[in-house]
Amino acid sequence: MSASEAATGTSATGAVPGTSSPRAFPEFIALAAIWGASFLFMKVGAAQFGPLPTAALRVGIATLFLLPLVLLRGQGALLLLHWRALFGIGLINSGIPFVLFSFALLWIPTSLTAIINATVPMFGALVAWIWFGERLTRAQSLGLLLGFIGVALLAFGRSGLSGPAGGTSGILAVLACALACVSYGIAANASKHWLHSVPALVSAAGSQIGATIALTVPALVLWPATPPDLKAWGALVAVGVLCTGIAYILFFRLIARAGATRALTVTYMIPLFAVAYGVALLGEQVTWWMVGCGVVIVLGTALATGRLRLRGLG
């Protein structure tokens, strides 16, 4: 697949979004289910640890899980060879967005954060257009506009939030989620550009090591005065090992097989799992306003990435 195909999510094969072959489809669904649970675990952890320590522990635990696997496979030299790219991508693909999402989850439900997370492919397409100089069709431009409108409606409209979450803090939380999605879009394209020849396990481990190095000192400075309980620790172990370590192996495999934009379409499925987990385990409520905004976001993202085409708009 060429760089332009990776950026726009198109190919001559017309494969299922997010996959390059039927064999990749189970990994695609598994990744959506795993990442859907990450919002639940981060919300539980952030409530006691705070946003930055939560993010730091997530990437740190993932590092402890992934690094021995890399060394056992004799791939440690690749970490040193590509350390600059791995550090940078780790910061923008894990460090920054994990902090932003952990902050947002202090104020808004997991279902809302997951809905906004569905804009990741849209931002991935936008970054690819800016980075690779790909021309946007009128349909893609309309998609970008619709996606931004959907996020704005969630932030400033009747999102169904009440109390502090319905005020300035709620708006900032929504904007933090949007900024995290921009960071993901940049990182996915950077991974395809600089790490396309690096094994998925090395990319996953190296990016988590980079994020851990960047977040360790700030996390220690902001460490909670009250010791968190076992429930919070358990949530962060789960999000570190399952939702970060294992998930990023799957994610980098999908990028290598299908390209950045196709891999990012996994975010279409994440809200379905996140909403189900939030309703079943946290007792969260999903409003019709949130559903409507989610439909606008997904529609805009589908147009922006070329998954949906409108006759006459190109």
Image (tube, rainbow, N blue to C red):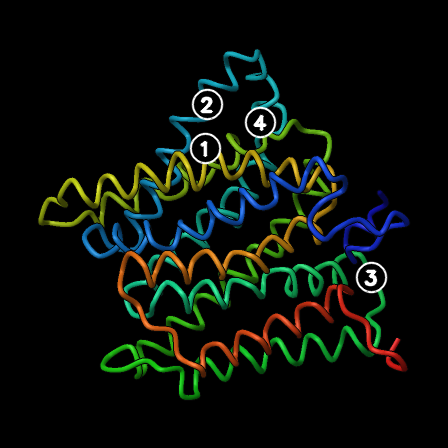
First in sequence, mark 1 or 2: give its number.
Answer: 2
Say whether marks 1 and 2 touch (CB < 8 Å). yes
In the rendered view, does 152 fall on the left or right side of 168?
right
Q: Which residue is mark 1?
A: 209
Within 10 Å of the Cα at label 2, are there few (<14), some (14-19), or many (20+) other Cα atoms? many
- For the residue labelled by badge 3, is the local secondary structure a helix, a strand or a loop? loop
Give the SS element for disc 4: helix
Q: CA distance from mark 4 to mark 2?
A: 8 Å
Q: Is residue 2 above or below residue 276?
A: above
Q: Are marks 3 and 4 in contact (CB under 8 Å)?
A: no
> Which residue appears at 58% of the width and 66% of the height?
119
| Residue located at (33% from left, 70% from top) | 108
Does label 4 or label 2 sit earlier along the sequence? 2
Task: State the mark number for residue 133.
Answer: 3
> In this rendering, which labeled residue sits more in front, label 3 or label 2?
2
Residue drawn at x 46%, y 23% is 67
Are dots 3 and 2 in contact, CB under 8 Å? no
Q: Which residue is mark 2?
A: 67
Q: Position of residue 199 (x, y in %)?
A: 65, 27
